[in-house]
Amino acid sequence: MDPKRDCLEIFWAGVRAVDPEEAVKAHLRREGDLLILDAEEIPLKELRRIVVVGAGKASARMARAVEEIVGDRLEGGLVVVKDGHGVPLKRVGVLEASHPVPDERGLEGAKRVVELLEGLSRHDLALCLISGGGSALLPYPVEGIGLQEKQTTTEALLASGAKIHEVNAVRKHLSKTKGGRLALYAFPARVLTLLISDVVGDDLDVIASGPTVPDRSTYEDALGVIERYGLAERVPPSVLKVLKGGLRGEIPETPKPGHGAFERVTNVIVASNLQCLLAAARKAEELGYNVLVLSSMIEGETREVAKVHAGILKEILKSGHPLPPPACVISGGETTVTIRGKGKGGRNQEFALQAALEIAGWEGAVVFSAGTDGTDGP
């Protein structure tokens, strides 16, 4: 066995299992005059127009699969992706923008997506393609907040150590596209949203801040995040004004479960972290390892999570528990890095460095940490 080489094989087996194009094709297909998403069938003859919109690191590759499936019935559309994540498409436009902190390109993309959706009728279909990073790549601040103020708020949230659902609770209430609001622009058109989940628990309203999903969070929740992480002095006054205005009922809430617009929306997760882990586990078993899939829902401060994983590894080497060598422990989730100073590294780099310190001197110990939804960090 070559543990370092095996780590790469195991990782890529997991990544292939959630390949954006293959994931879309596993759920969406065309059979003659029918467009089929899982068990849902839509007669193409009933549709006047079909467009694609989307945002996220994998959305361009998802769009490439949709182009292949829908073929000449696809009119066009636009997806917004992180810098360096675009691919050539035939009918759908691709716009690259900044992630994780939004920029003017993302704002322009969000406006174009909204314009596309507002032009649809009841006889049209929007295929919405959402993946990790979609929240930052589709910024459209509400009235009273500029993009710079949204950027400042995002930076403060990301540096605070807040969990992704907490970050998104704030983002949703500062955005015209998040928290189900994208579905409002598309109504009364039919919307099929295909999502690649990058969040713990696969909650639909958390993935990319749930642009086509009813929002369970409130202005009260958003203000609670600001208070909990001591951010009242770090976010712009205009942001606090909007959130407090919403709490008083002066600004409409995000659309909630039961809103009529969602009767025309179907949301389907086509790939998730657990799928990736299980495929990785199968490869590890093929390579001769005793395998433990620890969890797909790991959260917490990255350096502390790394210490726990290193402790499990050392226990295996010393006592053969919870499984004997040769062993492979696989986990996934979304840990956080509370920034100290001016560092820019991502959670995987942080995990690997901390784990390396913990296992120094332990013969036969190998730690591999990698992101499955694109690049690590900014």
Image: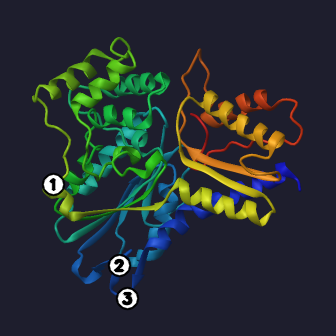
At x 23%, y 69%, the residue is: 124
Question: Residue at coordinates 68% horizontally, 38% vertically from top-left?
Answer: 309
Q: Where residue 32 appears, x then y in whole percent?
A: 37, 88
Q: Earlier in the sequence, mark 1 or mark 3?
A: 3
The reply to whether callout 2 and callout 1 are in contact (CB within 8 Å) is no
Three-letter residue code for mark 1: Gly
Q: Residues within 10 Å of mark 1 (few under 14, many from 20)?
A: few
Mark 1 lies on residue: 258
Query: Could you classify mark 3 by the number of other residues whose Cα lies within 10 Å: few (under 14), some (14-19), or many (20 or more)?
Result: few
Q: Counting residues from the N terminus, which is met first, the one under dot 2 or under dot 1?
A: 2
Q: CA distance from mark 1 to mark 3?
A: 34 Å
Distance from the alpha carbon under mark 2 to that under mark 1: 26 Å
Q: Is residue 367 visible?
A: yes
Q: Quadrant of residue 369?
A: top right
Q: Quadrant of the N terminus?
A: bottom right
Q: Which residue lies under the disc numbered 3?
A: 32
The tally of labels here is 3
Task: Name the residue: 49% across, 35% down.
Answer: 100
For residue 126, side relative to residue 301 (left or right): left
Q: Secondary structure at mark 1?
A: loop
**Which disc number belongs to residue 35?**
2
Q: Considering only vertical position in the picture, is 196 above or below 252?
A: below
Q: Nearer the viewer, mark 1 or mark 3?
A: 1
Q: 227 or 93, which lies in front?
A: 227
What amino acid is found at the position of numbered circle 3 in the picture? Gly
Front tag of 2 and 1? 1
